[in-house]
Image (spheres, rainbow, N blue to C red):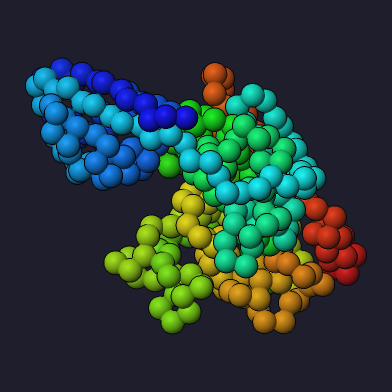
């Protein structure tokens, strides 16, 4: 496939950033991807190459955009069974099992959700990036539950916009050690890279981290544990696990941010993405998708109910 060229005309009285204008004209691309086009010298304004995304358009401008061909992914499709909750021409909603890594990383060059997604829907190749075909958001390796994938770039941007604007709503079920200070609550604690252990995240000062907000409500109490429903309002790495540990009730069997010796018989932490509320392309009202607790987590709850 060869390079494609697009000619756009800007004729407005008010000034506007170049990258914002391109997003409005080329909805199949995310703003970050268009910024890469600009940085790489693929955009010219009035026959002058512009490499700054914040370049200001004003009055009357002619913009030439060179769109490079999609690079074939080096990911190999793999035939891995997926628990599909919903699927249409635009989206794929999957109930991810604990233990499955979402996309390739160091030590995980195969067997990921990305490989499985390509095996299930080859048309997703290149959507959202070469190594993350169609993946709109992520879950930790040992967190189970709902994850959403897009089958084309327009859908990918449509869905990601709902996450970035906090219109998408995710709810998690978490069994925690101990009890939170109140039955319901809201946690606001910035998250950044751990200052000593670079593979971990940490609650840090505002100037060293990014804003992070979560709310929780108590669903069920046990002598030594509490079952919570948690709603994250931001999407920071390890956010729920960090926030619950921050208020003194870490996720059960989370040996990274919680107790080194699990208090329940699990080889994974008790955190499950139970529901997702989001609007799909072409629909007026959002849908809610749900994923039941996997058997190993349900068994832990049944055991706790018998001994309280």
User: Where residue 266 sits: x, y (%)?
Assistant: 79, 69
Q: Please indicate whether residue 305 sits to the left or right of residue 18 in the image.
A: right
Q: Please indicate whether residue 235 sits to the left or right of residue 92 in the image.
A: left
Q: Is residue 221 above or below residue 55?
A: below
Q: Furthest-right residue in view? A: 306
User: At 51% from the left edge and 73% from the top edge, which residue is drawn?
Assistant: 199
Q: Which of 200 and 76 lies nearest the eye of the viewer?
A: 76
Q: Furthest-front residue in view? A: 2
Q: Please indicate whether residue 307 sits to the left or right of residue 196 in the image.
A: right
Count all numbered tags in the image, as a single digit.
Answer: 0
Q: Please indicate whether residue 79 sits to the left or right of residue 164 in the image.
A: right
User: Where residue 238 sits: x, y (%)?
Assistant: 54, 62
- Locate the C terminus and report the quarter of the image it occupies: bottom right
User: Where residue 231 sits: x, y (%)?
Assistant: 56, 50
Q: Is residue 264 visible?
A: yes
User: Where residue 227 sits: x, y (%)?
Assistant: 71, 59
Q: Is residue 216 above or below residue 137?
A: below
> Quadrant of residue 46 in the image?
top left
Q: Is residue 231 visible?
A: no
User: At 42% from the left edge and 29% from the top edge, which residue is drawn?
Assistant: 2
Q: Which of 32 and 286 lies nearest the eye of the viewer?
A: 32
User: At 23% from the left edge and 26% from the top edge, which residue is drawn?
Assistant: 64
> Quadrant of residue 228 in the image?
bottom right
User: At 88% from the left edge and 65% from the top edge, which residue is drawn?
Assistant: 303
> Quadrant of residue 44 in the image?
top left
């Amino acid at each position: 496939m060869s390079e494609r060229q697009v000619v756009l005309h800007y004729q407005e009285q008010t000034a506007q950033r170049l990258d914002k204008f391109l997003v409005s004209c080329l909805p199949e691309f995310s703003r970050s991807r268009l910024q890469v086009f600009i940085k790489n010298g693929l955009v010219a304004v009035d026959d002058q190459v512009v490499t700054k995304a914040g370049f200001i358009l004003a009055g009357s401008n002619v913009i030439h955009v060179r769109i490079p061909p999609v690079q074939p992914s080096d990911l190999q499709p793999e035939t891995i069974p997926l628990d599909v909750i919903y699927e249409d021409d635009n989206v794929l909603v999957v109930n991810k099992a604990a233990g499955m890594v979402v996309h390739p990383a160091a030590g995980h060059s195969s067997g990921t959700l990305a490989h499985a997604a390509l095996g299930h829907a080859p048309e997703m190749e290149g959507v959202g990036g070469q190594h993350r075909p169609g993946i709109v958001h992520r879950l930790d390796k040992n967190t189970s539950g709902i994850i959403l994938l897009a089958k084309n770039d327009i859908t990918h941007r449509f869905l990601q916009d709902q996450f970035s604007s906090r219109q998408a709503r995710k709810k998690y079920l978490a069994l925690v050690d101990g009890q939170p200070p109140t039955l319901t609550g809201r946690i606001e604690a910035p998250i950044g890279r751990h200052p000593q252990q670079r593979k971990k995240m940490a609650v840090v000062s505002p100037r060293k981290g990014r804003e992070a907000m979560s709310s929780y409500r108590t669903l069920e109490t046990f002598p030594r544990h509490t079952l919570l429903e948690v709603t994250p309002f931001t999407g920071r790495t390890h956010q729920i696990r960090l926030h619950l540990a921050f208020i003194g009730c870490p996720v059960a069997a989370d040996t990274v941010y919680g107790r080194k010796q699990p208090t329940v018989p699990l080889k994974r932490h008790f955190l499950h993405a139970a529901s997702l509320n989001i609007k799909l392309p072409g629909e007026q009202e959002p849908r809610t998708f749900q994923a039941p607790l996997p058997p190993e987590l349900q068994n832990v709850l049944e055991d706790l109910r018998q001994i309280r």
